[in-house]
Amino acid sequence: MPSDDRLVLDLLTRLHESAVTVRAEGGDLRLDGAVATLPDETVGLLRAHKAAVLQLLSRVSSRMARPGEPVAIGPLSTAQRAALAAESEPKAARAVLRQSVRTTDEVDEGALRAAFARLLDRHELLRAVVVADGAGPRLVAAAPVPTATPRRGPVDLSEGPVCTLHVHAEENGTRIELAAHPLVADERTLALALDELACLYRGADEVPEPVPYAEFSVAQERYLAHPAVAARRRLIPAAPDALRVPARATARHTAPAPSADVVAVAAELRCTVPILRLGAFLLAVRRRWPGRAVAIQQPNRSGGPFAGVLGPVATTALLTPPAATTVRAFLVAVRDRVLDAHERQDLPADIPAGSLPGLHFTERSGPTRRAAFGGTLLPVEGVPPCGDLTLCHIDGVGLVVDHDDTPEHAATARTVAAVHRFLLDHLDRCLDLAPDELPAGPEEADRLGRVWAGEAAEVDALREILAGVLGRPDVGPRDNFFELGGTSLSVAKVVSRVQRRFGTAPSFADVLAHPSPAALARVLRTTGARDKPALAPLPPLTELPASPQQVRYFLTYDIDPARSGRVTVLTEEWESAEAFRTAVETVVARHESLRTGFFTDASGDLWQRVLPAAAPEIVEVPLDAESDAEQRAELDASMRTHTFDLTAPPLLRVLLHRRPDGGALAAVGVFSGVLDAYSQGTLAAELALAYDAARRGAEPPTPPALQYQDFCRWQHELARGAEFARARAFWAARYPTDHRGFHLPATAGERAGAMRMFLLGEELSARAREAAALSESSLFGFLLANFFARAAELHGRDDVSVGVLYHGRETEELADLVGYFVDLFCLRCDVGRPGDFPDLVRRVNQELFQAVDARVYQYQHLAERLGASPTDAVFPVTGFHVNNVIVPGRTEHVGEGFRERVVDLPYRPKFDFNIYVHETERGILIRMAYATTVVDHERAAAFAADFVTGVRRSADAVLGGAA
């Protein structure tokens, strides 16, 4: 079945559920019924797929045509024969359908009955009776007999009436009811008849001439007799064990409707809510009747001349339950079978006379606003023909189970209702269970339901946590955290808040693998508390070992612990020079890391010394340049010539150029081993807050309780415990001691380097972001997978190792601290494994998040294990590095004329490639540094072009083609 047809048929099903019919008319679509109540989403889908709907309707409408000659009522249609066969005593027929509309408008009962008489006169089927002669039963039209008493008991189908009207006076209005035998009406007929009755009652000028049901009967008979149609009908699988004789006596069991909202699950499984309810029924009856087919009614009104005909048009389809190992797989298979059956809804099931399906499921809408009589349309009620068991799920109202009146069937009815309700109320928990693991009876369903209801509080708490982290009003139980914009930074917040709320927390890899509140709740229930020391404020020390992250930084860049010219510069304009000076002093007082210096102990190990207080060096300087841009460049260049004495904190220096108006242009320079790229954004935000307080004369913000030295001491405690052993095992599995380094061959001579800067462009950046969300990834994770793919091509091998700088804020408490938290992970992934690009994105993200969980085993430990050192002339493990430099609080700006630029590097590169990913107002900016003794300019340009092409190709693969 073509996918477009599946989509259209699903859409037509939605319309039918909303009591709306659609037909093609003059190259356009015409909707009839409760159009005003259609959800905006359904209307949008109808507009988006109008061409496909028209194309399908053109095929459907050509299947049955109105006869060219007048047709008299007489022969029974297939639906009428089935309705008659279901009655064991036609002279005391029990089946009935009733539908009411409740209105607060004043109703003239006499005028209403006159309108009903006109309705019966216009539709001879509604006043038909059954006669039997030598040719078998047939219909004849009787005179209209409006009655004030609706039929509540058996009716003689040979005398009628088969359709009645009753007007109920109620406390707050009037209820208008139509009742009819299935011989003359299906459920859609009652709604259409109420609409027409309202038009006749109001004296509408133009009430369309009705299409006689007799024409449908003849057209259907001719259609089914066509050889091609007969051949299609023969292909429908037979299900003889699904049939039985009608029950001679029936009983009814009622139960509350399920209360859970399963819309998110329906979206996940790409089906409708009614299909989920049908699947729940099939699962509920499978223990009593395994493998037995269930009957469903299909509207058979997808278009054509008979879309609005009054009479039983609906057809019966028999669905055999699929074999599946999980509830999820079962429901997906049911979805596909329903869609296939919908494609064949013009072909009624071949049910022999005297038989009917033993099991039947039907779905009915709850009360809905209706244009007819300006009131509320109530759900269809009635007594259906019954075999073993019929379940009617009335949306938001309740479950009605009619069954053969035996003790065994009564017990089964209670079980089916209980399990059906349990499944839908806990569907997210049941999806990955085996069908045989579902409750076997009402008592077990009730007990497990109470247990799970308590556990639902955990899911609600996690929904609240994820919504707070993402800044959203709500997150559904099955919503995917990464599709909603989650990143590794926000995962850190999730982990911290879960730890505070539950006393235990998932790992980063757990969040990636189980990214919904419901799935995370299962992780928390199945994993015990982790024996990981907690990060907490401690009494401050003046001297302590440097953090493992600082040690790696000093080793990697061969930094003299006494002096260094490595400086990070923030240059900004300030309206008040004095307020800015106060802000700098405030920020230095708030963050111990800005009052920290370094020294080596007798063993040569790197230590840090923290001053309790320190006055920042603020130097006022004149500038020779005139323009603002030139002055910024001059101030920045002057700062970058400074060499810090690392033993004499604070390792922060300010160059300030006063303006005549009292403002200032200032450059803040900080030793790069004191703060990482993320902390640059934090420092900028801190300065802005402190400056604002100084301008307002407000009290400066107090220092945070947690300081960088608390993080350092926490890292050292982790390195002494079980967490380090687990991390070491993880990295040992990734990199055996015989690992061959991931490096390109270099030419002879001193290493030199260059940097190529280029933009992906706004359009491609937007598509990459959208594709990342659909791949359940952050934007950086999606781009990183692309770099893995290009690195594999460049090196000619599938086993790829890529170094990635991780921001290191694995707990929320670290998010607003200034310090050096960055870790270097050497991620490893087999790019050549089977799977599509989203699978590669998933595996790359999984590798990253598992590395975060094993971060306590540092890069220098891994290098040492492989017989190397970060101090080597080239990076150990891998020469290919990709770094996320999207810094919160800072916006990268590129000029309008910028497209691409190449500059020489002022240092000897230890890498083959060292790539930085920035986000700018013009899309993604890539700064690609490379060793020219390894990759020449031409090859680097080709790599950059291949990367852009690869991003476009992978985005198209995820999104389904070019924009």
Image (cartoon, rainbow, N blue to C red):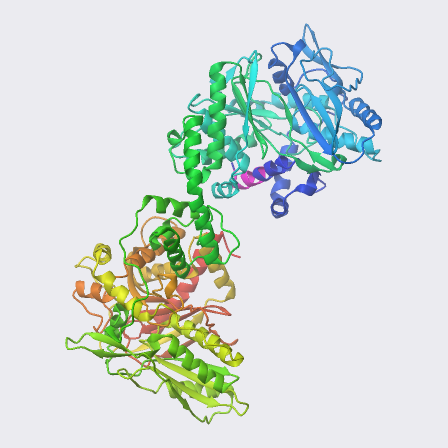
How many numbered circles does the render carry?
A: 0
Give whichever of 33, 724 is nearer the camera: 724
Can residue 72 be seen from the camera position used here?
A: no
Image coordinates for residue 856, horizontal then vertical, percent: 26, 61
Q: Residue 693, image x and y in percent?
A: 50, 77
In magenta stretch: residue 3: yes
Numbered range of the magenta stretch: 2-9
Q: Quadrant of residue 188?
A: top right
x, y (%) of residue 456? Answer: 44, 42
Where 393 falls versus 731 (above or below)?
above
Q: Is residue 619 or residue 626 the one in the foreground? A: 619
Q: Does the magenta stretch include residue 607?
A: no
Farthest residue to the left: give it: 603
**Quadrant of the rendered image containing residue 718:** bottom left
Taking the spot 45% from the left edge, 92% from the top edge, the residue there is: 623
Q: Residue at x 34, y 65 (%)?
A: 808
Name the residue at 21% across, 73% down. 871
Question: Between 944 and 489, which is closer to the camera in this rendering?
Answer: 489
Horizontal side, residue 924 vs residue 45: left or right: left
Residue 715: percent from left, percent from top: 27, 64
Residue 716 occupies quadrant: bottom left
Is 169 in front, or is 647?
169
716 relative position to 809: left or right? left
| Dominant SS in magenta | helix
As drawn, 360 above or below 795: above
- When the figure is inspected, residue 343 is found, relative to residue 567, above or below; the finding is above
Camera sees residue 887: yes
